[in-house]
Amino acid sequence: MKCMIKIIVLLMVSSAPIIAQAQLHSTNRFADITGTVGSSQGTFAASYVYNWKIGKQQKIEIGLGARWTTYLGTKKDFLTAGPAEKTRTSTTPFLIFFAGQQEQNFDTLTVQRPLTNSLNLTINLGYNLSRKWYAGFNIDLIGFSFGRKGSGILTSNGTTTNEPNAKPSSFNVLLTGDHDKGTLNSEFFIKYQLDDRWALKAVYQFIFVEYETVNRKQTFSDGSSNDRFRNKANNFGLGIAYHFIK
Amino acid sequence: MKNTLIILFAGACLFFNSCTKKTSTAMVNEMVDTTTAVLKYQGNFQKGPYGTVSGSVMIYQTNGKWQLKLTNFSTTNGPDLKVYLSKEVQPLSFIKLGDLKSTTGNQVYDINGSPDFMQYKYALIHCEQYNHLFGSAELMMP
């Protein structure tokens, strides 16, 4: 955990000169709403983005924002969400993406009617492909969640038990891979400018949604326990963006 | 712009409406081969807090395999109805036998493994999606 915090601080400090330089140039501010659907699940998101244009041609943008995401689904499987040393063969930050999975430690919490609401700080990257077309990426950094408590079925070590009070994890933070906590949304998108203010957006979304058990817990072979379970969803959708022009 | 909003709204409506699926009401009439099957446990359904279930349940053993049979069975309909063998009336620890095949008739469900019926002593009709118990039957030796 301390290592993760150091990395985040390092990233923030290292990006400060870029942002400071970018502040000398123009900005791109917009708000958007996006709806996505996947297999028995979907999301609605509303966000505000403040980007600084950088580079000589000012085609590249980087910035921060805030995003509200509502996720809902039906009968979704949430797998063991950590701790990372129980789910991955290596826990080195960033390298964890390439680490093998310890599937013997994965249990499943099937949440019957998951519904979460999350408000997160986001980081945004974009590139102006032309006057009309824009490509971008964004990801949630830190925030909080709340949502519907409900029943889930925990399948653990060959037994099936009912968890009547599964609830969304309340704290969200991006720490890379299985170190992540909570519900985090990310999007790759292409935007088409309809006029000076309005744009249409096509989105590929990758979202982590995390639920916790209250009464039932997964027990690992060393006796430690886990109450966090994560659904990783790939969704596609459409959105509308409104640009604030001075 | 207006059309885009309409498409998004229609998509959302479709998504929400796809969440509830009720059980078939077509009569089912499945039988257990009673020339080889031995009746081990049986019980009668009592209504639960969220539905009305009637009929009886029988547990048969055939050559080491276990089967559950619902006889003269009837239940009020609901979404996502399942058949459970459970340790408790309100299911906490249970074995899921599958989706309820129909709201009426005689139905047979295979039981995987060899559960300890001294522990799994209830047959339940349970709405899994909303965690609502429709009916339960306590299993006893005949």
Image (cartoon, helix red, strand yellow):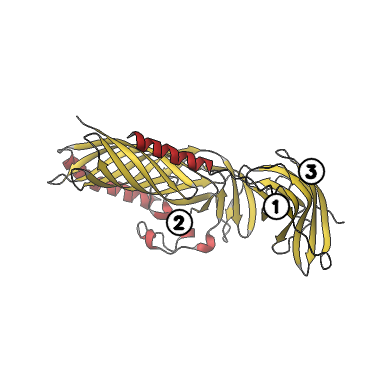
Q: Quadrant of the C terminus of chain B?
A: bottom right
- In percent of the image, x 48 and y 46: which residue is there? A41
Picture coordinates of residue B73 (x, y %)? Answer: 77, 49
Position of residue A96 in the picture relative to residue B79 (left or right): left
Q: Nearer the viewer, residue A112 or A27?
A: A112
| Image quarter in which the N terminus of chain B is found | top left
Numbered circle sitting on residue B67: none
Residue B84's disc number: 1
> Label 3 belongs to which residue?
B46
Under mark 2, the amino acid is Ala
- In three-dimensional space, the C-alpha distance between marks 1 and 2, rounded to whole angstroms, equals 34 Å
Disc 1: host chain: B
Badge 3 sits on which subunit?
A: B
**Residue under the image location 36 percent in, 43 percent down:** A238
**Mark 1 or mark 3, which has the lower sequence index?**
3
Q: Nearer the viewer, mark 1 or mark 2?
A: 1
Q: Are marks 2 and 3 on the same chain?
A: no
Q: At x 24% / y 45%, what residue is drawn?
A: A134
Q: Is residue B9 visible?
A: yes
Q: Quadrant of residue A155?
A: bottom right
Could you tell me which chain the residue with mark 2 belongs to?
A: A
Q: Amino acid at mark 1?
A: Tyr
Q: Can you tell which mark lies on residue A84?
A: 2
Specify the farthest residue to the right: B142
Along the line of sight, the residue nearer the viewer: A13 or B6: B6
Residue B21, position as x, y percentages in the image: 59, 45
Distance in Å between CA atoms under marks 2 and 3: 46 Å
Helix, strand or loop at mark 2:
helix
